[in-house]
Amino acid sequence: MNTAELVRIYEQNPTDEFVVKRDAAISAVATKMVATSSVDELFSYAESLSAGLRDAKLSGALRNICIAELQDASPSFVAEGQEIQIFVCALGAWLHLLAEVAPSESGRTAKEILAAAIHAGLSLAPASSNAKIGQAVTEIVRLSANAFRLTGETSRVRQNVPELAVTLDGTETAAQATEKVVESAKRSIFALRNNAALDREELELLWFCLGDHSAVLNVKLSSLKAPVGLVASALETTKLLRRLPATSHVNMALRNVATGKAKTLAALVSETEAYRKQFVSYLANNIASTYPNILPVTSAILGYSAPKDVEVREMSEWGRRLVLELGLTKFKNLGVI
């Protein structure tokens, strides 16, 4: 959806000037969103949009950014009574940045984290009562799913290690020569460290799969029944990851899980409740309590929020969802590059 289509959600007959100014605000909001190096801020933006979908109402920092940029683009704008316009501005900003996101070598750029977070937040969200907002959300989910998939795959491609090559003409001071050597070495060292991290990830996952032991429950992983084994396997698989999960990691998490009956989230929560303390202790952070709308399945299983999703889903689908959400929690420690 372009800006002209988006503004018609709240303004049926906009002028060209109106559309141009709203487009400028949307672009500015997208720029502000990716300017931070804080994972918490990025998650909070996705949390705000996901939590506000039902009533088309934002809260927190994202709302303030949208208001500021709408006022900057159009000085006559007053926020009072314009919640839907503020919300649509945020929708437009996400569509704007998702159109530009590209997989990186690190897999941890602000755009990639935002794409993964909003995919987690909106892909299980109930449909909006506003058909046009629903159309925008569907497009965001589609674009963010594609970005998430590409990031998981591309960020695991080994980098070519450049040779350490320095050209000196003899006029440099010792400090200048050293600076050139260090700058050239940085590129090689970064590639070597990146490749080593991926090698370590693969080795640890290999030993985890071969060992068939659940560290979180201290039993043979393949002996656990589907709901409990699913959560334990997802927790332990994602804890070993150094990038966003790819399809192969979902398969690893599901490898010992019997298909079983399709279940609701409430049933999944009920059948794993006896192991909740172990799960909470193993995850070792309360990120799911802070962002229950982008981590709804994890938050419900860990007892931080009530189950909201009422759909009956196959265990494999719950597994994919858990790996996505738990993979996101890795960013808390890894940070933005």
Image (spheres, rainbow, N blue to C red):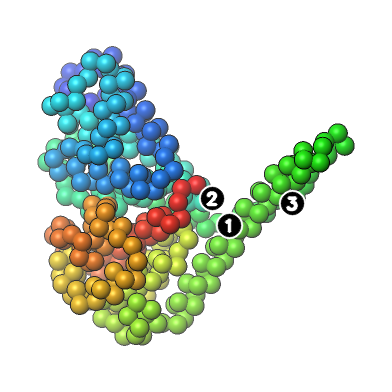
Res. 3 image quadrant? top left
Callout 1, which amino acid?
Asn
The disc at residue 163 is: 3
> Against 92, is 233 above or below?
below
Q: Secondary structure at mark 1?
A: helix
Q: Nearer the viewer, mark 2 or mark 1?
A: 1
| Disc 2 crowd, CA 10 A, few/some/many (<14, 14-19, 20+) | some
Callout 3, which amino acid?
Glu
The disc at residue 53 is: none
Q: Position of residue 66 (x, y in %)?
A: 28, 30
Q: Secondary structure at mark 2?
A: loop
| Disc 3 crowd, CA 10 A, few/some/many (<14, 14-19, 20+) | few
Name the residue rendered at 34%, 85% in the picture: 219
Which of marks 1 and 3 precedes in the sequence? 3
Name the residue rendered at 30%, 63% in the picture: 322
Q: Which residue is mark 1?
A: 194
Residue 123 seen in render: no
